[in-house]
Image (tube, grey):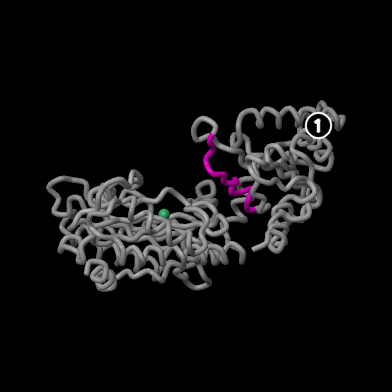
Amino acid sequence: MLKSNVAAVFNERRKKLMAMDPDGCFVLFGAGEVTRNNDVHYSFRQDSNFLYLTDFDEQDAVLVLVAGETHLFVLERDLDREIWDGERYGVDRAKAVFQVDHSYLVKEFYSKLEELLADAKRVYYSLGENNNKRDAMMISVLKRASRYQGKGSHGSLPLLDWQPLVSKLRIVKDDFDLQNIRKACSISARAHTLLLKRVRAGMSEFEASAEFQYFVFKNGCTDLGYGPIFAGGYNATTLHYSRNNELLKHGDLLLVDAGGEVNSYTADITQTFPISGTFSTEQKKVYEKVLQVNRTIISEIKPGLTYRDVHTRSVELIIDSLLSLGVLTGSVKENIESKDYRKYFPHGLGHYLGLDVHDAGLYDNRGVDVKLEAGMLITVEPGLYFRDRGNPYYGIGVRIEDDVLLTDNGCEVLTHELPRTVDEIQNLRTIANS
Ligand SMILES: [Mn+2]
């Protein structure tokens, strides 16, 4: 998709942000390069808030929104540097492609900002988000601007953080968000399904990961949204296992938590399946309990509930499962109080999803829970992990994660293409192992 074709989407988002405070001046820095080692950088990833408001994917840019207009500061064209690092937009092209009102060189930023502040009553800047040098420069510009505007004794313009306002926009998805997220979810779900047909005992976790990555990149993803987890057997009981360097063994389960990105929007999916064709009795019992929690939550989730309501409900269901597996004793209420279940379900039920795998947005606003509403996107990812020796389920880790979009009366599962029941999984696994 040509960037100029979607420029209107980003203009609309900037207008919405400025409408939240027409007298404010918003200042956001884009991401810079990050060194991996010596003179090599990690592949560039634009800051998600910057991306959300501009679609501009070059390093070291700055965005200023004031008096209804957009000012974008970009790197100078430098033919010598471009031989090494690739073509830059430069001032004129940046303005044309991203359809901003004004564009300038980054090196003009601090002096230009002083002028732009003349029209503002408040400044929105996120202190601590960038390096200290930028923070110090911003503060000195604000000081200078207060003198420049002849209001020395009034002090600097009030400084506020734009994060709550930008998060408020990002938490409810617009059409462009959804178009990309739907694609990321569909490609990723199909890549997970492919694993059911391809994975074999004796393969390394890395090789399984390569199968996933090959499929998502071949089908339109340009990155993974987070470090993938390919955890065979006991490794699955480590929540963020990321070494992915062991061999897959007959009789074990493989837990895969991975998602591809489309236009920087990510899917977040987990499936767990037997490396041999079939689940053992214990594995099946645990798997079916977790699936039941996942399905129950998905059937109950709807606008008006809060994330805390949904998480609390999942805790009740998990405790119920652990009681029927004979792992816990007593009542649901007693176990909620003792928190003993946390040994087996230590994480939350899910999180917002979008440009970030753990996306922007408040769960509670100064003690008041945020209500779920149509257009929000959250993950539903109950899990059970048994790390205690002597437990009949020792070494089993199961997580089942779907991505769901809140609708007017319930939710839509964007990852519905995944085979989830024991029968569906075992049927596909038989093909792989035959
Ligand atoms: Mn997740």
Categorize mark 1 by other alpha carbons within 10 Å: few (<14), some (14-19), many (20+). many
The image quarter in which residue 301 lies: bottom left
Question: Is residue 1 a member of the stretch shown in magenta?
Answer: no
Relative to 51, residue 153 above or below: above
Name the one closer to the observer, 348 or 189. Answer: 189
- Left or right of 53, for residue 425: left
Region rendered in magenta: 40-52
Residue shown at 47% from the left, 57% from the top:
260
Q: Position of residue 311 (x, y in %)?
A: 39, 57
Question: Is residue 42 a member of the stretch shown in magenta?
Answer: yes
Q: Position of residue 222 (x, y in %)?
A: 52, 56
Q: Residue furthest right?
A: 150
| Ligand 1 positioned in quadrant | bottom left
- Left or right of 182, for residue 429: left
Relative to 251, residue 41 above or below: above
The image quarter in which residue 175 lies: bottom right
The residue carrying mark 1 is 145
- The three-letter amino acid code for the residue at tag 1 is Ala
- Left or right of 287, for residue 371: right
Q: Is residue 308 visible?
A: no
